[in-house]
Amino acid sequence: MGRRVDNRAWVALAAVVVAAGACNTGLNHPPTGPRFAGTVPSPAPALGWRDTLRVVSFNVENSQEVDSALAVLTSEPDLAHADVVLLQEMDETGARRVAETLGMGYVYYPAILRKATGRNFGNAVLSRWPIVSDEKVLLPHRAIFGRTRRIATAATILVGRTPVRVYSVHLATPVNLALRDRQAQWAAVLRDAAKHPHVIIGGDLNSGSLGALALERGYAWPTRDGPRTVHFGRWDHIFFKGLMPPDTASSGTVLDNRASSDHLPVWAVGVIL
């Protein structure tokens, strides 16, 4: 008798292929834009000086359920009152709504304009501290489906007198790029960050293992261990350079995302060294 085939595995694989194609069918934006941004609503000095930052990363799945995502971000004790929030798969309307609701400044760069929805698709950095500079970081290698590119949104925030470089990252899926090409995308982010002494990187790596390269380059990886953040593994992460988690209980995953996404949000706390 032949080996039994698990139809559920084939269905799951087919779903990934379809989703990968759908997410990457769009028009690439220019290398430097468009750019959407808003300033911190209240002066940052009123928050008082702190050397500890609470960071959240959340892929909100095409900005489809922003209200539900906001409910998670504002009600979960580990996410509420975050200093930095990194969002992926956002459009400009969703990024602005989240920033305004949380009382944060923000910068958002889309990678593509999706053909299916007519909406932008990209990453945002939200901060309670002033954003003093920002840029769109183009990642190498275009997707097999649609030839679209991925980006990182980079921002420098001023925490007291300390500049901290922050990246919201969304790497290509395993269906769309070979491992070596996704490694090159991740290396491009780390290369851009190399000139900054204090760095926060967070986002959807579409991988549970690429973070090892960051460890080799001196980063702390507080979100390395924990439950799956998507069906296929633990793909959402936060990394620190020039910041140190204060203890082993200073990171985690919110298990109830209120049906706001196919990802779970992750968080970590870092102390500026």
Image (spheres, grey):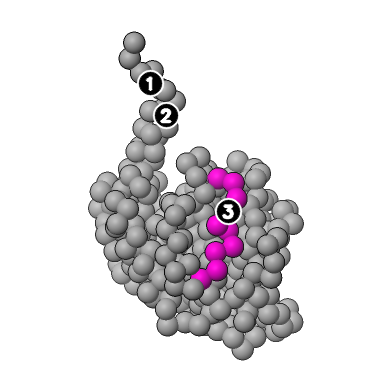
Q: Give the extent of the magenta segment.
A: 219-228
Q: Residue at x 52, y 54 (%)?
A: 236
Labels in figure, total: 3
Number of the label disc, if any, that sits on residue 5: 1
Mark 3: which secondary structure? loop
Is 243 left, or right, of 92 in this rendering?
A: right
Is 7 within the magenta? no
Mark 1: which secondary structure? loop
Cα distance between the residues tagged 1 and 3: 31 Å
Where is residue 90 drawn, in percent x and y? Answer: 48, 56
Number of the label disc, if any, that sits on residue 9: 2
Q: What amino acid is at disc 1?
A: Val
Where is residue 83 drawn, in percent x and y? Answer: 65, 70
Number of the label disc, if any, that sits on residue 225: 3
Q: What amino acid is at disc 2?
A: Ala
**Foreground disc of the pair 3, 2:** 3
Q: Residue at x 60, y 71 (%)?
A: 127
